[in-house]
Image (cartoon, rainbow, N blue to C red):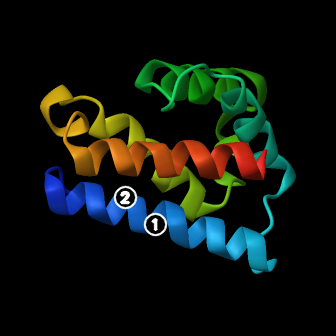
């Protein structure tokens, strides 16, 4: 379960970095459903992917392909993106140095995986 606060942000960052490492090593390769999500987020402006961009992406994917679209995405990626959006529900948490580092790590993953 995802927890908010400094430890939760460190965990979010670690999970983003782990997925980035797996991408670089070839251990994880985004499937076509992941790619659709990543491409929708890759064009978002700013140093972090804002909550609304993530929510909009999930809404669009659901409207385009129904629950099948999201069920076929890699669980680690889906959870990471949902937790990224949830972390931004509390601006005081997202604004912490740990929060900004975590959100930047997610942004970096999306850019490299898209």
Quick check: 1 above or below 80? below
Cα gap from disc 2 to disc 1, whole angstroms: 5 Å
Quick check: 63 above or below 86? above
Say which quarter of the image contains residue 107. top right
Quarter of the image containing the C terminus?
Answer: top right
Say which quarter of the image contains residue 41. top right
Q: Residue at x 70, y 43 (%)?
A: 111
The residue singled out by tag 1 in the image is 15
Give coordinates of residue 106: x percent, y percent: 52, 48
Quick check: 2 above or below 70? below
Can residue 83 be seen in this snapshot? no
- In this picture, residue 22 sits left or right of residue 94: right
Give coordinates of residue 60: x percent, y percent: 67, 21
The residue singled out by tag 2 in the image is 12
Helix, strand or loop at mark 2: helix
Give coordinates of residue 104: x percent, y percent: 47, 44
Helix, strand or loop at mark 1: helix
Quarter of the image containing the N terminus?
Answer: bottom left
Q: Residue at x 41, y 68 (%)?
A: 14
- In this picture, residue 89 sits left or right of residue 83: left
Quick check: 45 above or below 78? above
Q: Residue at x 69, y 53 (%)?
A: 73
Q: Are marks 2 and 1 in contact (CB under 8 Å)?
A: yes
């Amino acid at each position: 379960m995802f927890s908010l606060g400094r430890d939760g942000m460190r965990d979010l960052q670690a999970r983003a970095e782990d997925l980035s490492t797996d991408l670089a090593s070839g251990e994880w390769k985004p499937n076509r459903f992941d790619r659709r999500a990543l491409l929708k987020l890759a064009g978002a402006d700013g140093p972090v992917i804002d909550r609304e961009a993530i929510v909009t992406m999930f809404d669009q994917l659901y409207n385009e392909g129904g629950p099948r679209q999201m069920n076929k995405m890699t669980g680690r990626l889906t959870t990471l993106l949902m937790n990224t959006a949830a972390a931004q529900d509390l601006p005081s948490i997202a604004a912490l140095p740990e929060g900004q580092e975590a959100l930047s790590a997610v942004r970096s993953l999306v850019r490299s995986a898209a």
